[in-house]
Amino acid sequence: MVSRLFETMTKTGYIADKITKHPATVIVSAIVGFVQIVLWILELLGYLKRPGLLTTLGQIALYILAALCVFVFYRVFNENRRLKESYAKIHDLNHCYRQTLAETSLALLSLPAGDKTDVKERLLHIEKETLGKALAIISDIYEHLLAHEVVATVWLFDPQAKTVEEYVNSHDGRKSTRSVRRGVPLHIDKNTRFCECKTIKDKFCHYHSPDLIETGNTKEGYDDLVPHYIDHYKSVLVVPIRFRVEEAGEEKYEDRLGFLQLDTMSRYQLNDAEHLALLAAFADQIYNFMSLVRRNYMFA
């Protein structure tokens, strides 16, 4: 009974979050708040007569709407505060990539002529280490926004076998309830979050489930080869790490390196609006970084 009540409250909060962030809600709340202030001033100055029943009911409705106005503005203020806290993190993320690329270029240039021994292995190590740091920053950004623990993961894609394999996640080396699937290839067709990563919203290709329990109980269901996945994440958002060229609405070329996944144990937290747009931008950064580093494999 308690868990069902908590589930209902969580889902209601998720819907309320979308409503209170809508521009129309903010505008209506602002107008109602202004009208209520004017009425209070008129009442204090004695310009309003003793209220009748309808006037009283109207004032009660205005009080309720004024309370909604305060709540909406609090949500907007709190959202802005958390966004400001994330700005510095985004700067740190860009600096992380830039610093690594600069140091890698200098290291390669300092190699003696003809000495290209183990360059590929060194670059792989640098790439993985940097992505781990970047994912930790991405995780921190979303934890600022959601106030819940979030795990960010990069999955590498094998186009020949049509499988993905966990490459690195933001909680490597940290205590986490997350299971590590390193070294275990997962077939895309048997993992909904990858095979269905085709939904397009505002030009962003992705897969989104605010509640995997609810998604798993639908007619379409939810497939995941990770054993007992529900013990590790209950809300998930996935975007491809790729470069794609289209002509006349048809795909001409695609270079898909993998997938960027964001998940959390908290249900109804990740959305397919601003969270998706931000994650898609991070995936593009990862693609640019990986393609720049891997281009150096020509030295091997």
Image (cartoon, rainbow, N blue to C red):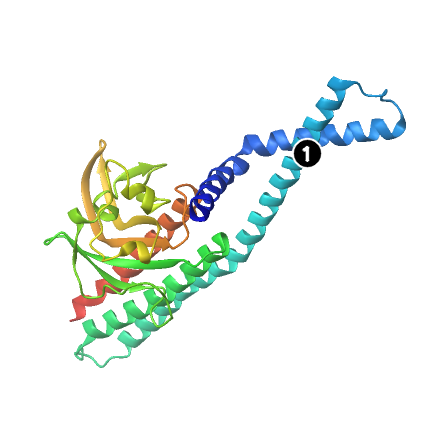
Q: Position of residue 33 (x, y in %)?
A: 70, 32
Left or right, residue 95 beside residue 238: right
Asked whether residue 250 is in view, the answer is yes
**Residue at the left extreme?**
160
Which residue type carries mark 1?
A: Ala
Q: Position of residue 253 (x, y in %)?
A: 18, 44
Relative to 269, is 143 above or below? below
Residue located at (81% from left, 21% from top): 51
**Residue at the front extreme?**
1
Question: Quadrant where the N terminus lies?
Answer: top left
Relative to 218, is 259 above or below? below
Asked whether residue 101 is in view, the answer is no
Quarter holding residue 53: top right
Quarter holding residue 50: top right
Frontmost residue, 274 versus 185: 185
Residue under label 1: 66
Question: Quadrant where the C terminus lies?
Answer: bottom left
Q: Position of residue 292 (x, y in %)?
A: 27, 61
Residue located at (48% from left, 52% from top): 146
Relative to 33, is 93 above or below? below
Q: Secondary structure at mark 1?
A: helix
Left or right, residue 66 beside residue 46: left
Frontmost residue, 247 versus 251: 251
Q: Position of residue 65 (x, y in %)?
A: 65, 31
